[in-house]
Amino acid sequence: MLGHLIYIAAFVALGLAVRDTSLAAADSAIVVLGVIGLWRYGWAALNFLRATAYVRVLYPRRRARAEAAYARRPVPAHAYFMVTTYKIEPGVTSRVYSSIFEAARRSPGGATIVASVVDGADLRVLRDLFEARRHDMPQVRFIIDQIPGTGKRDAIARSLRLMQREAPRRDDIMLFVDGDSAVPADIVERSAPFFTDERVGALTTDESVEIPDDWLFRNWFDLRFMQRQMMMSSMAFGGRVLTLTGRMSVFRADLAVDPSFIRQVQSDHIDHWRLGRINFLTGDDKSTWFWLLSRGYRMTYLPDVRCVSYEEQPMPGFVESAVALMKRWFGNMLRTNGRAVALGPSRIGFFTWWSILDQRVSIWTTLFGPISIALTALFATPAVIPAYIAWVMFTRYVFCWMLSTFRGGGFPIIYAPLLYFGQILGASVKSSALFRLDRQKWTRQAAKKAAARMPLGARLRSATSTYMQVLALGWLTLSAALSTGLL
């Protein structure tokens, strides 16, 4: 509470310290920023209202209908678990697979688990874990598939082909689970009813995170998942979420073993006018999402079901870790963004289409504010800086309160500055990734190899990427200067 009082006092004091006459030279900048702010805050408010309506009204009705329809089925769904484990701490592996075994044991229609591993040590750990519980799980079949370390996409495709031989029924479900994510014990009975709707191809759930060490990194992740709860709920209101989270999502099993689905997961790519063919290394969750989106399937969200992710800071510092993760997340998003927009609003619905388009538009609207303020402070009046800081502090504080209503209310005061940090750094990373769609790297990849001279073609692509990003930022800066009356 004390932190909140100090924070409020700080932005009130900053606001009161600025006189009206001090901002006379910044009138144009204030008007322009106000218009953009109304647009962005209006968009946030719309998503908040949609999310609230979904969580409190629409979702309970959908769940009740789904469970009633599922209860009428003569045979419950068989649950297939597809789990990939690579370079995970043994303690985390034990907790994750214990949760999977418990969920499989509780599956009324039985379960089949396929665990894809690279390391022989992981194989032995998993075998021991299963043997210790085998007598409690007579309806559970456990397959360990040790594979060469050629990548997660190959591992998923191989596991799916193994399960393809089982000939899953239309009523069965398949859970994609990362090796660092624990599933709820009742995940099968909570998720299977939603597939009684033939339009639903997949669903994803709420998430929480456990990070043992870094306090700031843990709060940043908690805030991201709180934002995710609101945005996922808003998108589910219209029947199509914007991603099927790779940590844990549930699919209609017969769709997940479709040969074209497996091919897309294993060898997805886009053809870029400047960068050529880009074969996807990361972002398998975007490939599965796009396969379903392009075929007209709905993808929903369960806000009352939560999996737990066990994360660790990938780099020594907080900022470096945030940048490394954002590069992967936003690169995955932007590589699929263009082809999703190309599907058009008539095919995927206007709100879904606009939300996908806004993933690109928001890069520039987010950066426009700080650039305009910097130019105004430099060429008109520095008084705009404390006014802008007070406004940022106030709006992010209000938005954090709105977000917190999806998690019971209340939040640590560090969320407010972390929200702004994530918005500005995120937009900066997106602006870089947008012009470098060919750059991909897993967070758990080994340390960099010794630097090797890049081929001429790769150097030219890198140079043109830098040129185009600088050009785009230059045009943004020019437009900021013109619209605020500085030029």
Image (cartoon, rainbow, N blue to C red):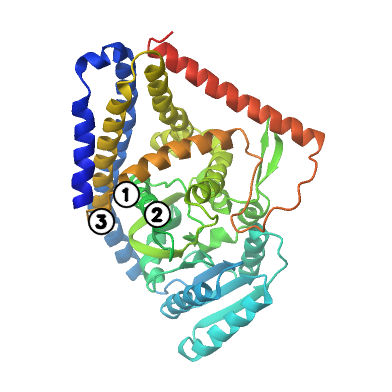
Element at label 3: helix
Number of other residues with Cα within 10 Å of mark 2, as a class: few under 14, some 14 to 19, many 20 or more: few
The amino acid on which the numbered mark 2 sits, given as a three-letter code, is Leu
Separation (CA) of disc 1 from disc 2: 8 Å
Camera-side mark, 1 or 3: 1
- Vertical placement of 170 versus 186: above or below? above
Q: Looking at the picture, tell me which residue is in the foreground, 143 or 422.
A: 422
Inspect this view and state whether residue 238 appears. Answer: no
Q: Looking at the picture, tell me which residue is in the foreground, 397 or 227.
A: 397
Residue where numbered disc 3 is placed: 61
- Vertical placement of 415 versus 22: above or below? below
Residue 63 picture location, percent across and down: 30, 60
Residue where numbered disc 1 is placed: 414
Residue 14 picture location, percent across and down: 23, 31
The amino acid on which the numbered mark 1 sits, given as a three-letter code, is Ile
Disc 1 and disc 2 in contact, CB within 8 angstroms: yes
Give the side of residue 168 with respect to residue 171, left or right: right
Q: Residue at x 40, y 69 (%)?
A: 187
Disc 1 and disc 3 in contact, CB within 8 angstroms: no
Element at label 2: helix
Number of other residues with Cα within 10 Å of mark 1, as a class: few under 14, some 14 to 19, many 20 or more: some
Residue 25, disc: none
The amino acid on which the numbered mark 3 sits, given as a three-letter code, is Arg
Residue where numbered disc 2 is placed: 216
Disc 2 and disc 3 in contact, CB within 8 angstroms: no
